[in-house]
Image (cartoon, grey):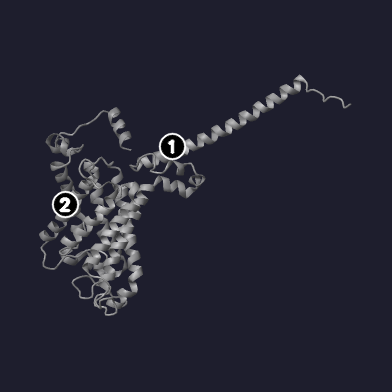
């Protein structure tokens, strides 16, 4: 019969126990170290996002946060700048469709080979293009709020508690989105522009062959500066008033159909108020493409045309949107708003409050 296997000595057992304990300790230390590194990275991300005025936690599905690709360098950058990226691409899509519709209508005018024998589209095609562009842009930028317009962003800071620190980076993202999208439209239609104006020739209205109006707005020649400003002001006022109505869940509201509601709003503004100044109603949609057109050779006339009209679609939308938001909150909105405070919110300006450091820090944390 085989002899029984030798039993380990007490010393060997103690040695094995110590070795196993050491391995468990090493594993736990490694896990703790990795956890500590992950927490440190998350803390860095949160700190950067907070300084940008963004919420410390990016708007990402919980299932996506734990996937391995989130450790890649670009994934980390995307997490930090998710909302500004969304505003950039939302504005990009809006201007791409809007400027594209203007380009197709203007550059094909009178073309006999088109269906109907008079070009590919008419003025209503432009209203459709801008309406669809806004609707799709809001879908793209939904996680950031889908503002796509610095004046709309400002009004939400004033009346809907959007953190003020987000305004600069959102404005920059929206401006760059409009600038880049108009550049893509120009590159796509450059042969058609050359066909209309001639190679190396670029003109602005009121030239009969002007193509600068593809990218930004120019007023009718008979308008005074007061007319120009009021046209942009009233259109921007209606824009913000209706946007707040569509977002107001205590009213009928649009809910998940908000992008569709915005399509009809933009289409209606173009159909009813587009003749005089082109209903820019958006600095990012007008100044960004205007700067692009200057850069590709349309010259100083992009600034001087219409009696230096260029500043009106930059400034008037801010006044109009702020006024439109004020009107909605004054007469219809019953929720929390500066308008629904003593002196219609003016007391905060006339007699500002200076909170203690503890209260101020708490308020900053709540905002971000």
Q: Residues within 10 Å of mark 1 (few under 14, many from 20)?
A: some
Sequence-wise first label, 1 or 2: 1
Q: Position of residue 237 (x, y in %)?
A: 16, 51
* The C terminus, quarter of image: top left
Can you tell which mark lies on residue 9? none
Q: Is residue 220 visible?
A: yes
Residue 130 located left or right of residue 339:
right
Query: Could you tell me which secondary element the residue under label 1 belongs to?
Result: helix
- Read off the residue under disc 1: 43
Can you tell which mark lies on residue 237? 2
Q: CA distance from mark 1 to mark 2?
A: 41 Å
* Image quarter of residue 337: top left
Which residue is nearer to you in this view: 303 or 134?
A: 134
Disc 1 and disc 2 in contact, CB within 8 angstroms: no
Q: Position of residue 292 (x, y in %)?
A: 30, 63
* Image quarter of residue 306: bottom left
Query: Could you tell me which secondary element the residue under label 2 belongs to?
Result: helix
Q: Is residue 147 visible?
A: no
């Amino acid at each position: 019969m085989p002899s029984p296997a030798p039993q380990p000595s007490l010393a060997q057992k103690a040695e094995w126990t110590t070795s196993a304990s050491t391995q468990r300790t090493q594993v736990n230390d490694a896990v703790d170290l990795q956890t500590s590194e992950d927490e440190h990275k998350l803390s860095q991300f949160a700190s950067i996002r907070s300084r940008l005025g963004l919420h410390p936690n990016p708007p990402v599905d919980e299932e996506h946060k734990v996937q391995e690709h989130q450790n890649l360098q670009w994934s980390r950058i995307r997490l930090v700048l998710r909302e500004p990226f969304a505003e950039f691409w939302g504005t990009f899509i809006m201007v791409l469709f809007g400027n594209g519709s203007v380009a197709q209508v203007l550059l094909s005018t009178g073309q006999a080979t088109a269906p109907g024998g008079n070009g590919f589209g008419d003025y209503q095609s432009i209203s459709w293009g801008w309406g669809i562009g806004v609707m799709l842009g809001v879908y793209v930028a939904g996680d950031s709020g889908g503002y796509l317009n610095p004046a709309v962003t400002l009004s939400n800071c004033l009346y809907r508690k959007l953190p003020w620190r987000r305004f600069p980076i959102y404005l920059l993202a929206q401006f760059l989105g409009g600038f880049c999208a108009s550049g893509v439209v120009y590159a796509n239609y450059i042969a058609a522009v050359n066909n209309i104006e001639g190679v190396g020739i670029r003109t602005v209205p009121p030239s009969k062959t002007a193509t600068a109006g593809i990218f930004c707005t120019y007023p009718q020649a008979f308008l005074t500066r007061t007319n120009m400003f009021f046209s942009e002001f009233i259109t921007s006022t209606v824009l913000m008033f209706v946007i707040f109505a569509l977002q107001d869940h205590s009213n009928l509201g649009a809910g998940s159909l908000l992008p569709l509601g915005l399509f009809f709003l933009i289409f209606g503004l173009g159909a009813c108020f587009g003749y005089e100044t082109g209903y820019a109603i958006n600095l990012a949609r007008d100044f960004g493409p205007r700067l692009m057109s200057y850069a590709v050779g349309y010259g100083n006339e992009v600034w001087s045309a219409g009696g230096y009209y260029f500043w009106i679609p930059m400034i008037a939308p801010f006044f109009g949107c702020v006024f439109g938001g004020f009107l909605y909150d004054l007469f219809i909105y019953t929720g929390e708003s500066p308008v629904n405070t003593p002196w219609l919110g003016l007391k905060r300006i006339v007699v500002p409050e200076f909170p203690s450091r503890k209260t101020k820090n708490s308020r900053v944390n709540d905002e971000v």
